[in-house]
Image (cartoon, helix red, strand yellow):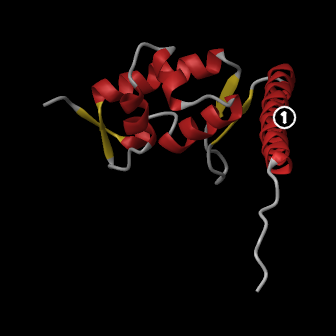
Amino acid sequence: MAKQVDMSEVWPTPALFRAARGLLNMGQDELAARNGYVRKTVILIENHVDPTMDTRRQEVVEVLAAFLEGQGIEFIRPQDGKGGGVRFANGKREAQTVSEVRHLIEERRGSRRKAVSVDARKKAKKKPSKRKSA
């Protein structure tokens, strides 16, 4: 059995991993694939609740944290009674990500509008049914 470490020695925390991915608008699949892991590895790390962690998994945490930091993420350690956090390391990366997310939102809205428009045209082409009156 592999050696276990106390979760107080594991940084960043599972919750901060999820938050960092959210800031980057990055899915578990992408984070895993870009680092040579499978999605299940990321899921296990992000959902970890035990008081200890296997040292092998801790090594994966360190690799993924370094990758996220390379993507412009900064993990903030708890201090002065305040909890840890995650933020963009610089405003330029934040602005880029916000722009990317806005673009994705607009694309999705456009495809929904297009689908609704097609459905409306199909309904308009249908002839109203003639009902027999008694």
**Along the line of sight, which residue is nearer the eye, 6 or 106?**
106
How many marks can you see? Answer: 1
Q: Residue at x 79, y 44 (%)?
A: 122
Note whether 4 is above or below 56 in the view shown.
below
Q: Residue furthest left?
A: 1
Q: Residue furthest bottom?
A: 134
Q: Residue at x 84, y 34 (%)?
A: 110
Residue 66, x across and y down, in percent: 55, 18
Q: Is residue 76 visible in this depiction of the protein?
A: no
Image quadrant in which you'd find residue 107: top right
Q: Is residue 40 visible in this depiction of the protein?
A: yes
Quarter of the image with the C terminus in it: bottom right
Residue 63, x across and y down, in percent: 46, 18
Q: Residues within 10 Å of mark 1 (few under 14, many from 20)?
A: few
Residue 109, x across and y down, in percent: 82, 39
Residue 100, x across and y down, in percent: 80, 25
Note whether 70 is above or below 97 in the view shown.
above
Say which element carries label 1.
helix
Image quadrant in which you'd find residue 16: top right
Three-letter amino acid code of the residue under disc 1? Gly
**Which residue is label 1 attached to?**
110
Note whether 32 is above or below 101 in the view shown.
above
**Along the line of sight, which residue is nearer the eye, 120 or 128?**
128
